[in-house]
Amino acid sequence: PPPSPPFPLLQIHPPSSSSPLPACFLPAPTTPAARSRELPPPPPRPRRALARAPRDPKLDTVEKIVEDFASDMALNPFSSGTRLRDMIRAIRACKTAAEERAVVRRECAAIRAAISGDGQDLRHRNMAKLMFIHMLGYPTHFGQMECLKLIAAAGYPEKRIGYLGLMLLLDERQEVLMLVTNSLKQDLNHSNQFIVGLALCALGNICSAEMARDLAPEVERLMRSRDANTKKKAALCSVRIVRKVPDLAENFMGLAASLLKEKHHGVLISAVQLCTELCKASKDALEYLRKNCIEGLVRILRDVSNSSYAPEYDVAGISDPFLHIRVLKLMRMLGQGDADCSDYMNDILAQVATKTESNKNAGNAILYECVETIMGIEATSGLRVLAINILGRFLSNRDNNIRYVALNILMRAITVDAQAVQRHRVTILECVKDADASIRKRALDLVYLLVNDTNVKPLTKELVDYLQVADPDFKEDLTAKICSIAEKFSQEKLWYLDQMFKVLSLAGNHVKDDVWHALIVVISNASELQGYSVRSLYTALQAYSEQGSLLRVAVWCIGEYGEMLVNNVGMLEAEGPITVTESDAVDAVELGLNRYSPDVTTRSMCLVALLKLSSRFPSMSERIKQIVSQNKENMVLELQQRSIEFGSIIQRHQSIRSSLLERMPVLDEAAYLVKRASATQATIPAYKPAAVTPGGLKLPNGVAKPAAAPLVDLLDLSSDDAPVTSAASATTAPSDFLQDLLGIGGTNLSTAGAPSSASTDILMDLLSMGSSPSQNGLPSPGLSSPALGKSNSNRNNDLIFCFCSHY
Amino acid sequence: HPTRSRPPSTDADPRRWHSRLSAILPSLATGCHPVRPRRQIRAATPTRPRSSSRASADLRGRRPSLAMINFVLLISRQGKVRLTKWYSPYTQKERTKVIRELSGLILTRGPKLCNFVEWRGYKVVYRRYASLYFCMCIDADDNELEVLEIIHHFVEILDRYFGSVCELDLIFNFHKAYYVLDEILISGELQESSKKNVARLIAAQDSLVEAAKE
C-alpha cells in the first residue's frame, strides 16, 4: 500500500459536518520540520539531542530503513534494539505479506528472548512493539505475563504501559486477568493519584464480575476522594461494576446522589452516568433517586443551559452539550411513569427545547435528546406540541443525519401520538425512495408501522410502484414488507390477489416461500376468484416468466384451474376476455418445465400441473405424455420418478385418472395461519425459513413416492400398529386400498384411488390427529428441500397430505 | 512523592509470581500457548456458543448491552486498522470478523450519505477525517448525534495534543493515542467534556514519565 501522506485530520472539513473549527485550530504550516512525523511530539517533553537529524519523509526509502536496521543490529546484536518507530517504519515499508511476516517474526523472537531473559531495560519499548504487532493481527500471548510484570513494577512509566498492554492484549474472559486483582488493589490504594487513575481506568474497561465484586469497596472509597480526576474515574468504574454485578447497586446509591452536588463537569457527567446505570439496575435505586435527585438535576440543567460562554466547555456556541444530554437522559428515566416528576421537569424542558439553537450538530443532539425525553415522560400537551414541532423541523432538514434521526423519533412517537405521525406520511414515503440506504430502511420500517385500514391502499400502491425501480438489495426488504402489509390489512380478496400478483411479477425472486404458499391457500378458498386468478397469472407469466415464485404459483393455478382459463369461466366485470387454447396452456407449463426454471421444485410442480392438465384436457394427453416422458432419464431422481409414474398413469390408468386428479379440496385458511405462525416461531433459531417449515405448504406435489422409510416410522407411531407392506404396486384397485387403510396391511400410496372425504376422517382418527388434513400439508418426502431432521409429526403430515392430494 | 518506591512485597515480586503461576498453569511457563478461558469466569456474562457461524445471530440477539459505546475503531481508507478499543466482550476471532465486516460496510459508503449505518442490530456512527474513519458502535436506542460530537471531541483533543494531528501521528504514536482515548472514555462512557482538562491531565502524566526517565 502506498504510504499515507501526512494530511492533518482536521484540516479538511468532513463532508457532512456542520461545525467549523474554532479559530484556535488553524491549519498547520507545511514546513519540512512540521511535516516530518518521525520526530517525537513537541514539548512539554524537554528536547534532547536527537541521535539522528530530522529526516525528510521523501528520503524514507527501503534502503534507508534497512540501513538503520543494520546499524541497530550492529550496536545491539543480542537484544531487540530497534526502536519502536523503526520497527513500524520497517513494517510499513514491506511490500508483501511475506516480508511483513518475516519482520514480525524477527521482532517477536527478539522480544521473547528479552522477556525470558528478564531484561529490565527496554521492557517499555518491547511492550509497545508487542502492542503494535497485536494490532496487526498476530498472536501475542507470550506477552501477557510481561504485562503483569510491568503492572507490578514500581515506576509510573512501567505501570502506564503495563496497564495499556493489559487492556489491549487481554479481555475479561481470560484467566490471566484474575492475577491482576492483587496488583490492582494495591494500585488503587497508591498515594500517586495518577497511578490510582490508571488502575481505575483499567478496572473500568475490562474487569470481570469476580474482580468487580472484590474491588468494589475500594472504588467506593475512591469516589469520596478529594481529587476530581479520581472521583470521576471511580464513578465510571462503578458504572461497570454495577453492570457486571447489579446486586451491588444499592451500595452506590447514596454516593451517586451526593456526587450530583459537585461543580466539576467531569464529575457531574460521570455521576449522572452512574445514576442512569443504577436506575437500570435496581428499582430501589430508581425510587431513591427519584425522591432525592430531581431538584438537583433540574438545577444542573438550568445552570448549564443559562451559563455564559465558557471556552473550556464550549462546543459550537453551546456550553457543554454532553452534560445537557446526559442530564436529559437521566430525567427521562426518572420521569417515566411518574407524573410528579414529569411535572417538575416541565419548565426546564420547555426552556431547553425553545432556547437551543439548531443550526449546529451539538444543538441538534440536545434537541433530539429533549424530544426523546418529552416523549418518554408524562408530559403536558404543550410540551408535546413543542416536541412535534421540532420533529417537523428535523424532517424537512436537508442534512441526512437529521432526517435519519427524525425518522427514529417518529418510530417512537407512533405510540405516543399516532395522528401526528400520520400527517408526515408523505414525507416518510419520500424517504423510502431516498438515495441513502440507512434512511430508506428506517423509512420502510416506519411505513410498516403507519399502515392502517384507511391508508393501506394508497400506501401499498406507492410501495409497489417503487418496487419496480428499487435497488436489488433493497428489493428483498421491500418485498417482505409489502407482502406482510397486504396480508395483514387486506379487506377484499380481490385487492390482495392483485397486489400479490404484481409483487410476484416485479420481484418474484425475492418472495419468500411462505408468502406464496399463503397466496395459494387464499386462491383455493376464493372460488369465485379462481378464474380471474388463473387468467391474471397466465397473462403475467407471458411477460415475467423468469420470476421464480410467479412461475410456481402460475403453474399450480394453470394445473388446477386449467379449464377455467381456457373457457373464460367466472369472469369478473372489469376483465377483458382473453383467448387461451388448451395448447397455449400446455405450452406455458412446458416452457416453465424446460426453459425457465432452474430448480427442482419448480420443475416438479410443472410435471404435476401437466398431469392435471392431461385429465382436464383429454385431447392434449398424447402431447403431454410426450413432454412428461422427456424426463424419464433425468438425472434428478425426483423428476425421473415423477416422470415415469405420471407417464404410466396417463398411459395405462385412464380409468382412475380423472378421479385421481379432481380439484383439490379447499385448504383451511384459518388453521393454516395458526400453524404457520407457530411454526415460524419454532423454526427461527434452528432453521432458515426457506427450508423445511412444518407449517409451510408445498402444495402442488400431489403424488408422493412410495416412501417406505417414513411410512415405517409413521406406522410405528400411530395408534394402530399395522405392519408395513411394500408400497407402489400400480394395479391395486381403490377398494382394496380402503380396506388396507382400515387396519390390515400397510398403505399403498402411489395409486391411491379416490377415497372420499370420509376416509380422510378415518385416516385422521387412525393416526390420532384431530385437525383437518389439508392444512398440515407439508413438503412431501420426495421434495428436494433439505431434510433437516424432519420431526415425526412432519412425516405424519406428509402421509396425510399425500392422500388428500389425490382428490 | 509521586514515585516513592515501596519495598516489594512477596506477592509483587515478578519472579516468584511467575514460578507460582507456572505451577498452576503450566502452559504459561513456555509462554507459547494461548490461554484458554474457562467457563466459570464467564458466569456473569451470558454463555455464548463457540461456533463462529452462529456468531452473527448471537451478537445480535444475546449480547447484553454493557456500554453505551461498544467499541471504537479507527480504520484507514485502505482498510488498515489504526486503533481499536473494545468496551464489550468480544473474542479475538469475533473482533477480526467485526472489523472485516465494518470495513466493508463503511468504506464503501458514499460521501453524501448520513453518518450512521445499521449493523447487526447496533448502530455504527462513523465520520471521515482526511484518510481516517473514526467509528463508534452504539446500541439502537442511543443518541447518534451525541456520539458524532464525542468523535469530534476526541479528534480535537488529539489535534491539540499532537499539534495538527494526521494519520502518521496515530501510526507511530499509537500508544499515546490510546492514552488520550483512556482519558476521554471509560467503559464506553464519556469521562470529561473539557478539552483543557484532558490536555492538562495527559501533560501531567507525560511529565511524570519524563521525570522517571531521568
Image (tube, helix red, strand yellow):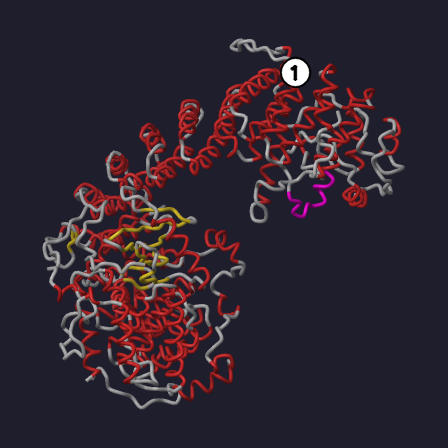
- The subunit carrying tag 1 is A
Q: Which residues are magenta?
A: A786-797
Outermost residue to the front = A63
Helix, strand or loop under label 1:
helix
Across and down, in percent, residue A353 comes to: 21, 42
How crowded pointer 1 is (Cα within 10 Å; few <14, some 14-19, many 20+) is rated as: some
Q: Which quadrant, please, contains the N terminus of chain A?
A: bottom left
Residue at 88%, 31% (x, y): give it: A739
For the residue pair B74 and A39, the one nearer the viewer reads as A39
For the residue pair B214 and A547, the one nearer the viewer reads as A547
Residue A595: image quadrant is top right
Q: Is residue A769 left or right of residue B140?
A: right
Residue at 39%, 64% (x, y): give it: A97
**Is residue A505 visible in the rendered structure shown here?**
yes
Across and down, in percent, residue A705 comes to: 76, 36
For the residue pair A93 and A167, the one nearer the viewer reads as A93
Q: Which quadrant, please, contains the C terminus of chain A?
A: top right
Check if residue A317 falls in the magenta segment: no
State whether residue A695 is above or below residue A118.
Answer: above
Q: Amino acid at mark 1?
A: Ser
Across and down, in percent, residue A341 comes to: 29, 48
Q: Is residue A304 left or right of residue A76?
A: left
Residue A339: image quadrant is top left
Residue occupied by mark 1: A583
State whether residue A804 is above or below residue A684.
Answer: above
